[in-house]
Amino acid sequence: MTSPSTPSQERPLLPAGVSLTTLDNGLILIVREDHSAPVVSVQAWSRTGSINEGKWLGAGLSHVLEHMLFKGTKTRPAGRIDQEIQDAGGYMNAYTSFDRTVYYIDVPSTGARTAIDILCDIAQNATLPADELAKELDVIRREMDMCHDDPGRRSSRRLFETAYTRSPYRFTIIGYPDIFNELKPEDITAYYRSRYAPNNLFFVVAGDVKPEEVVAQIKQAFAGTKARPIEAVVLPDEPRQTAPRETIEEASIEIARLHLSWHIPDLRDSDVPLLDVLAGLLGTGRSSRLFREIREKQGLVTSIDAWTYNPGNPGLFGISAVVEPAKFAAARAAIFGEIDRVTREPVAEAEIAKVVKQYVSATLSSRKTMAGQAQDLGGSWMATNDLGFSERYLDAVRRATPAELRRVARTYLTPENRTIYALMPNGTAPKILPSSESSTDNAVQLFTLKNGLRVLVREDHRLPFVQIEVGFRGGVLAETPTNGGLTHLLAKMLLQGTPKHSAEQLANEVESLGGHIDTFGGNNSFGVTVEVLDEDFATGLGLVADVLLHPAFPADALERERTIQFAYIRAQRDQLLQSAIRGLRRTLFGPTGYGLDPLGTDDSVKALTAETLREFHRQIMVPNNCVIAIFGHVSSADALSRVEKLLGHWAPNPELAKVIDRHDPTVKPTGNRASAKRDKKQAVMVVGFPGVPLNSPDRYALELVQESCSDLGSRLFVRIRDELGLAYYVGAQNMMGIRNGYFAFYCGTSPEKAPLVEKELLAEAAKLAADGLTEEELRRSKNKIIGQKKIGRQDPGNFAMNTMLNELYGQGYKFIDEEDAHIEAVTLEQARDAARRYLVAERAVVSEVLGDPNGTEE
């Protein structure tokens, strides 16, 4: 990698390990050879998105093709592509943006030829079969309903519709129903033939490949396809905004969404890297100005961040927040205050250095995976035709100065260039608003200190990062109905300060290192996760130790986090699948263990005090309930020595068993149905059964059953979505924990079709219990699960977290090495027997959330 001090003009035209080839028909091939992990990411980029749809602008044609290209080709019938990718152990998906549609397949390197062959095939030979097209168009209509119901998606779309007046960026990518419904099959076919020409495509392949073999294969695949004329789509320029815009709308939601944006130049402009730094300074991380001042100190928002959208054409600088309606006006005014401050006062050099290091660290971190490397190259080529653009962009970020940041803030963040959009709960919109402005094979090592603390260390010197994952058993298993949400609140309060560091100082110190610190929590555990550069390992570990041993639980922070937790509890109601799953859990498990909501209830959270947190911390955050994983660019001996020095004196709790699991196994299901209504357009149906714990030998068979029911080629998908057209999404979930979990089928549909969906889900469960899986389903599911685990393990943070949790939950830190063999060993008979044991109709629980304009209660 080029040194950070290398001037941009000295950078090579092509990054190291990258080749660029242009075929005679105009197809461009970008290949990065990287043998650090046995994984390959293959991506086909089409220079066509929603802004390129010509007379069909606003129809969502590009998005329709995203849905259809995997539906079959001249040689591959519907469903075959998904099966081939599963056989290869890979994962496929696609996305559509304003100016591009990207199809990608991530596979173990053994499946690279298959992935390349499939993407070459769909780019040239997609058949767009009429029966499949009709089903997918109906699926997209349901997706439109989902986007309407989701406050985040809906408000983001409306922001762009408000900020842009002529540019096609104002039109939603998915399309508008009135225009979408006018599409005919011949319109979609014509668009495919006109836009998917080789001279309007490029391929990016990154990973464990030989470039010459990749080029030869793609060249052969496109040998018979000639370049075609591409109709130029002239995009109108967005007129300069000359006055502030503001739109406030109401909807049936719980929490307000507030967005502010300002127009900025296109990505190639020298001011854009400076605006990225400015966005980081204002709203990236816990030490950013907006987070510290508006969320932490004033408690005016639930969440807030700043961002830039930088396409090939002029984009937006934005600030987004989730706000309690009663605090909307104050939050808006506070944001104006921070914008005014950054335009008036010079930024300290130290603050810029922190943000620059954050940005550089985040950019480098995105390249940990082959998919990330391919995305980086593809994005650079798409925007600028310069494969080294992202490195040159980093150089520009590093050159940011106080004077330049102040200049761009004054230039772009002006009142006349500002757009505000807010989506608020019904009846809460203010009538009058204020007018103020390379891989290693190093094995994981386990060390156990005298106090019971387990330390996992894995050296990986491929990238200059160190990942620290700290976990404790806890979660809902350690809670009761009267103190529900305790673990979640404790985890959040860990970062609110210690006697040595205030919350602001803690966030500032970590982010000044270009690192990040956060907490996590769930059903079975909670903890702290930290990533720093290797040179800052000692500092990062010291901060972790301070957070673990000495949380201060300040009263003002406790009240703020409690208020935010109340907001999260209410906001869950907007997520229908999540609501249905909660209903299933309450019914299956009752008021204990997994029947409890990790966020708790209003009453239980209200009852939590600082003393409650201190006592819980004293009992449960102890070394004999803790595993620390340190993975990355470290020395094992040095890591262990530092942990012993910082945490070797930590006192264990001999009574730990009494507090880490308060689940009552005698509690029985409270019934066989949970039903709720919401003022939404869609419905969600979940059918669940009592399941298994992590240490059950049946878990592997149930994982395979779940996988066989969750892919685009699965029996559930084919029957319920493709054949019957009942759903936008459908799948299965096998929730496992330290205690028995559940196995569930779920489906998003329309309210009038919910009874039929329920009948079909129960019928599919009965078929599985009677017949089990087919040999083909079992093979594909094994390949998919094992392939995805290989892909996931290439990310050091993911690897460290999973290894730590395996040790914490009693499976052992080596389980990750044995997991593939357990999956591979499952037989057809074992899969069938597991389905018969657990998918028992008499034990089924149905949980439904139905869209109803009058729905208000669970």
Image (cartoon, rainbow, N blue to C red):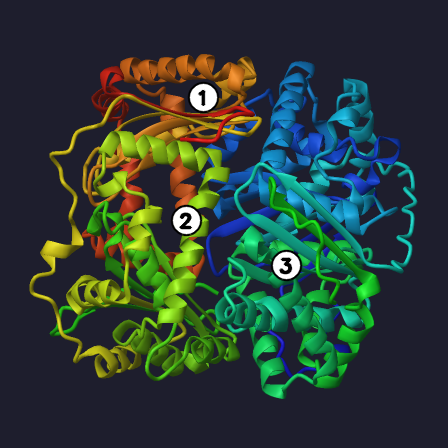
Q: Would you say residue 216 is visible in this rendering?
A: no
Q: Position of residue 606 (x, y in %)?
A: 32, 54
Q: Name the residue under label 3.
A: 329
Residue type for callout 1: Leu
Residue appearing at x 33%, y 30% in the figure: 584
Q: What residue type is labelled 2?
A: Lys
The residue that disc 1 covers is 716
Q: Which of marks 1 and 2 is nearer the N terminus?
A: 1
Considering depth in this image, is 696 or 504 the residue closer to the camera? Answer: 504
Which residue extends farthest left?
A: 654
- Residue at the disc numbered 2: 790
Q: How far apart are marks 1 and 2 (CA)?
A: 26 Å
N-terminal-most mark, 2 or 3? 3
Task: Name the amino acid type tagged 3.
Answer: Ala
663 vs 149: above or below: below
Which circle, 1 or 2, is nearer the viewer? 1
